Amino acid sequence: MARVKANNIEIEYDTFGDPSNEPLLLIMGLGTQMIAWDPEFCQMLVEKGFYVIRFDNRDVGLSTKFEEAGVPNIMQLIQAARSGEKIEAPYTLDDMADDAAGLLTALGIEKAHVCGASMGAMITQVLAVRHPEKVLSITSIMGSTGNPDLPQARPEAMQVLLKPAPTDRDGYIEDSIGRRRILYGSGFPFDEEKARKFAELSYDRCFYPQGMMRQMAAILAAGNRKGMLSTIKCPTLVIHGGDDPLVPVEGGKDTAEAIEGAELIIIDGMGHSLPVECWDQIIEAIARNAAKARG
């Protein structure tokens, strides 16, 4: 793994494949390190002809932390958002999209295909709006538009975000497995051993839950992005789980509706997760969407 300075922060990243191939930037979701993009998943993308880049967003993993900003009161921000009040956050999704654009520039990459999951999908959308010159195609997985009229997360899924994580290693690992199980969806077998290994790796690499709260504030501050998504002109793929308890499938439908020509794929039984059984379908669709950018 390596690190570069971009957009006035330090960004940890790594790559897979041949740098002479078309670049594909992967952006992960809320409070989640880049290692959530499984190396096998990344290698499958390499076999489709991509040069794959994954990175830690600001405030997670080994990238710059914003400790001096303090921890926002998320419940207060949620109430303010529901009341239509303006949200003040330590940074915004715009800043996080600028981080991604800055990383590409720092790596000498003029344009890239971009794929984001969950909050990463939101960042991907904003990147395509703010920096269209950097984007060849986008894939938005488990994302939404921020439209307040859409169905909200199920209560048990919302608790996954709001409940404080245990600080001891063993407690964190068991708690993390439970959270992942709630979000996983009903259509595919939950691999507890895989979830355990990921939780162990995540804790040992960087346990930093306070960064997730600032990232959540950035999401709340972004508000309804549906109007601006209509400006996206690059080939767009929207993938969503039909059983997503955190970002209901209507979020994916709303995203696809907002972007002219977007392809929508709904995977029955998939929750807020990327089950191994879906990788072939997802990767084939990403490659097919990328091919549209070549004319």
Image (cartoon, rainbow, N blue to C red):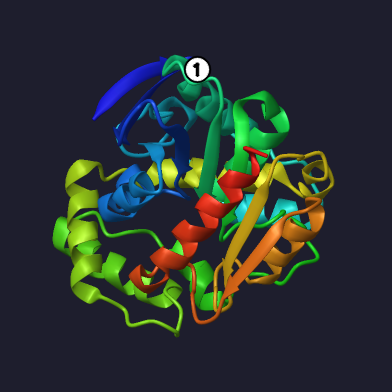
Residue 240 place in picture, x, y as percent? 58, 67
- SS of the residue at dot 1? helix
Q: Nearer the viewer, residue 269 or 80?
A: 269
Image quadrant where residue 147 sits: bottom right
Residue located 24% across and 50% down the image: 202
Q: What amino acid type is highlighted by mark number 1?
A: Thr
Residue 10 place in picture, x, y as percent? 38, 20
Q: Residue furthest front?
A: 295
Q: Which residue is mark 1?
A: 105
Asked if residue 82 lies left or right of residue 127, the reply is right
Quadrant for the C terminus, please: top right
Image quadrant where residue 155 sits: bottom right
Asked if residue 218 lies left or right of residue 117, the reply is right
Residue located 72% across and 54% down the image: 145
284 relative to 152, above or below: above
Residue located 54% across and 20% down the image: 110
245 relative to 36, above or below: below
Asked if residue 93 lies left or right of residue 81, the reply is left
